[in-house]
Image (cartoon, rainbow, N blue to C red):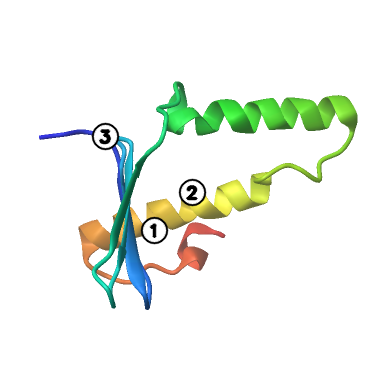
Amino acid sequence: QKGGRLLRAHGTLGELTFDDSTQEIVITTFATGDVQRMTVARETGGHGGGDTRIIRDWLEAMKSGDGSKLVSTAQESLRTHAMSFAAEISRRERRVVELAELGV
């Protein structure tokens, strides 16, 4: 059993997958069956380096007084975490969970 995250996104024209354990991105075009593969460099730190980047960007915004380059606000982070919690409740209880139930 391999660990890490697996991302799979389906679109009208194709599919993209990312396997955290191999750092490989695979793009498949449905109409032609064409498959493109690429490997990205592994980043250290929580959430594949994302935690470090968010803190670095926040510190830079505080230092410069310019928050325009922040990729996530506290409100957005709260909402996305609530979505994850709602998905877990939905999975366990086998029902639709509205974000309003979680106060969001």
Within 10 Å of disc 1 (Cα), the crowding (few <14, some 14-19, many 20+) is: many
Q: Earlier in the sequence, mark 1 or mark 2?
A: 2
Residue, disc 3: 22
29, 64: nearer the viewer: 29
- The Cα–Cα distance between marks 1 and 2, rounded to whole angstroms, is 9 Å
Within 10 Å of disc 3 (Cα), the crowding (few <14, some 14-19, many 20+) is: some
Q: Amino acid at mark 3?
A: Thr
Residue 56 location, x and y as percent?
67, 26
In this picture, is 52 found above or below 68? above
The reply to whether dot 2 and dot 3 touch (C-beta < 8 Å) is no
41 vs 80, left or right, is left
54, 28: nearer the viewer: 28
Q: Give the residue drawn at x 27%, y 70%.
A: 95
Q: Give the residue drawn at x 27%, y 73%.
A: 32
Residue, disc 1: 86
Q: Give the residue drawn at x 16%, y 34%.
A: 2
Secondary structure under tag 2 reads: helix
Q: Amino acid at mark 2?
A: His
Residue 43 location, x and y as percent?
45, 26
Task: Tell which residue pokes out farthest to the top in this image.
Answer: 44
Q: Nearer the viewer, mark 3 or mark 1?
A: 3
In this picture, is 56 found above or below 70? above
Which quarter of the picture shows residue 88?
bottom left
In this picture, is 23 found above or below 46? below
Q: Is residue 9 visible?
A: no
64 vs 30, left or right, is right
Residue 36 location, x and y as percent?
32, 54
Q: Earlier in the sequence, mark 3 or mark 1?
A: 3
- The Cα–Cα distance between marks 3 and 1, rounded to whole angstroms, is 29 Å
Label at residue 34: none
Residue, disc 2: 81
